[in-house]
Every structure is written in C-alpha cells, then in structure tokens.
Amino acid sequence: MNRLFIPLLVVLILVLLAVAFSFDSSTLAVPGWHTTIYPPYFIGVIISILFLLFVSIGYWLLTNIADKIIWILFALHFTLTIPTAVFIFFPSIFLNVQQGDQEEIIKAVIFRMKLIPVAWTLFIIGQVLFVSYTVRAFKASRLPK
C-alpha cells in the first residue's frame, strides 16, 4: 500500500464514524403528526462532517500532486481534530447520569460545557493548519522544476 494514502484513509474513517454516530434524533409517533427533535449540537456536527469531507478531498488531491506527506503536520492535524471527533462520537462523554448527587451531575455538565468550545477551537486550528499546508503544496507543485 502506498503510504501517501494513509492520511486519506484515516480521514475517511473519521468521516464514516462521524456519520454513523452523529445522527441521533427523537421522533414523535402521534398519528397525523411528524415531529423530529434534533439535539442542539446537530448543526455543529453537520459542519464538522462537511469539513472532514473537504479535508478528505484535500488529502486525495495531495496524494495526486505531492511526492511525500509531511507526517508531523498530518499528526498535528489529526491530534487537533480528535477532540471534536470524540464529542461527536460520544455526545454524553464526561456526563455520568448514574450519579445520585445532583451537584456532581451539574459539575459534570459545566465541565463538559467548558470543554466543547476548546475542542471546537482545536478543530478550527487543525483545519486552518491543513488549508495552509495544502495551499503551500499546490504552490510548490506549480513551480517549474
């Protein structure tokens, strides 16, 4: 297997996992009514899946023009993307509903609410890093050799 395709496969696996785990909704089964209730983070999940799709297209284009992949940048991009992927795959992470103490549940919710913006910020930084790397690779491929 060509090592240039490893980043593409990793991102495609993330996309498939995100699609499989992210579309949870509640439906109301009253005759004559059709109501679907989406969770509040649904729009953010859709945006991150679209970004991951664009990143997979970007890695596919990079495999076509680049002779090599800078593995450190790929590892950094992947590491910055993982926290948001964890919140997509496991929406109730850091929430232990089995706890009997209401104050502990509130503390867990507050902790999770503070972590989500950090994860999204890391995700955006990772995507900006990827875009800058892709633009530099495209410019380098167009230079005469």
Image (cartoon, rainbow, N blue to C red):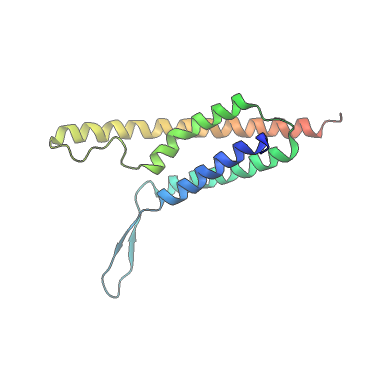
Residue at 53% in and 32% down: 78
Quadrant showing the N terminus: top right
Q: Farthest bottom residue?
A: 32
How far across and down, in percent of the image, does residue 97 sit? 21, 41
Q: Farthest top residue?
A: 72
Instruction: Please say whether residue 51 is visible from this viewpoint.
Output: no
From the viewer's perspective, is residue 53 above or below residue 131? below
Quadrant showing the C terminus: top right
Q: Quadrant of residue 27?
A: bottom left
15 sits left or right of 111 in the view: right
How far across and down, in percent of the image, does residue 22 sit? 41, 49
Instruction: Please say whether residue 138 is visible from this viewpoint.
Output: yes
74 sits left or right of 46 in the view: right
Q: Quadrant of residue 105?
A: top left
| Residue nearest the viewer, comparing 67 with 107 | 67
How far across and down, in percent of the image, does residue 5 sit? 64, 39
Q: Farthest right residue?
A: 145
114 sits left or right of 137 in the view: left
Give the total number of marks visible in the rendering.
0
Residue at 13% in and 37% down: 100
Residue at 70% in and 38% down: 63
How far across and down, in percent of the image, does residue 18 sit? 46, 46
From the viewer's perspective, is residue 44 above or below residue 71? below
Residue at 59% in and 30% down: 74
